[in-house]
Amino acid sequence: MKPPYEITSLILKYISSISEKIGEVNAKYLVKTNPSLRKQNKIKTIHSSLSIEGNTLSEEQITAILENKRVVGPQKDIIEVLNALEVYKNINILKHHSEKDFLKAHKMLMKDLIENSGKYRTKGVGIVKGPKVEHVAPPHENVPFLMKDLFQYLKDKSEISLIKSCVFHYEMEFIHPFMDGNGRMGRLWQTLILMEEYPVFEFLPFETLISKNQTAYYHSLSASDNEGKSTKFIEYMLSTIDKSLNELLENTTTTKLTDENRVQVFLENFVDEFTRKDYLNYFKDLSSATASRDLKKAVEMGIITKNGDKKTTTYRKN
């Protein structure tokens, strides 16, 4: 069964706004041309997602761990960061529609933190806020088939990715399939679902905005629980993604692509054998002479291999 939700005018407004902003990010090659921005945003993502769960390490400490420097801090917090870095190192080989990869990611994320990492819970759980029971998760014996259904839903190609990612995030939090690590897994898997269609989400730290206003995040989850559908959570998450893209566009200086950058950007999006015409079609404002110079230099640098001659010339990534 398809998880329940409604398409509201607010959801349509955010989808339109997000699509426009992603187009602008892609047109400016913002993230791809700036390796330091990619690194900085990855650190922000890890810091924010873990701080929501109570991790006390700063962005500077996470940067130090990434650079293999010694950091003084609670052992549990350091392990959480090391695990998150390992997951993000492997993020491009995880398949968003694979339940097996989902469990593998949880095992990496929660290694040395809980028993039975990478396995669904075998006990009942509830979420308590102060004196109040906020949420009682479904019985543990229902978890395997509920998650199986949820992964079946991910394979629905007729569903808009932006909505699908929010629905999965909410439904997974509702099922609460693990004893611990559910929140960070929900945010990670939403990123993975979005990355499939929009590579920019690998480096978009929307968790930062969630971290700054956790009350709104938990309120949207609670409101959806009360309504029995994920509509409120979809509206909340889309507004967060929209704001995050806005911050990226406002705070990033557009850098002019160098010849080497151009080739690298092209190769990230064109993995098969290609011609100079393919290269020109990708960079429509480039002259034929500049395209030829780019490709010649890339061959000399060993980035690509040239085959054939003149009109039969093709290139392939090394």
Image (tube, grey):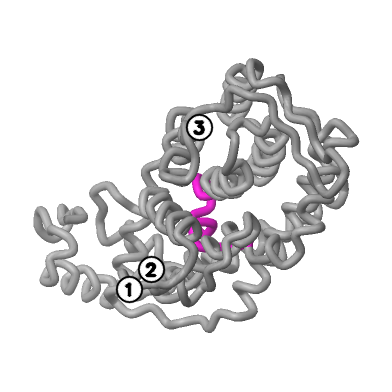
Q: Which of the two marks, 3 or 2, is nearer to us in this view? A: 2
Residue, disc 3: 97
The residue positioned 31% from the left and 69% from the top of the image is 68
Q: Quadrant of the C terminus?
A: bottom left
Residue 174: quarter of image: top right
Give the side of residue 68 with respect to residue 11, left or right. Answer: left
Report, in whole angstroms, how far the alpha carbon at label 2 lies from the one at label 1.
Answer: 5 Å
Q: Quadrant of the N terminus?
A: top right
Report, in whole angstroms, how far the alpha carbon at label 3 lies from the one at label 2.
Answer: 31 Å
* Nearest the eye: 56 or 257: 56
* Nearest the eye: 7 or 78: 78
Q: Secondary structure at mark 3?
A: loop
Q: Which residues are magenta?
A: 195-207
Inspect the image, locate mark 2, and give the three-letter code of the amino acid beneath it: Ile
Residue 56: quarter of image: bottom right
The residue positioned 32% from the left and 62% from the top of the image is 279
Question: Label 2: how many residues lie within 10 Å, few (<14), some (14-19) or many (20+)?
Answer: some
Inspect the image, locate mark 3, and give the three-letter code of the amino acid beneath it: His
Looking at the image, residue 117 lies above or below residue 208: above
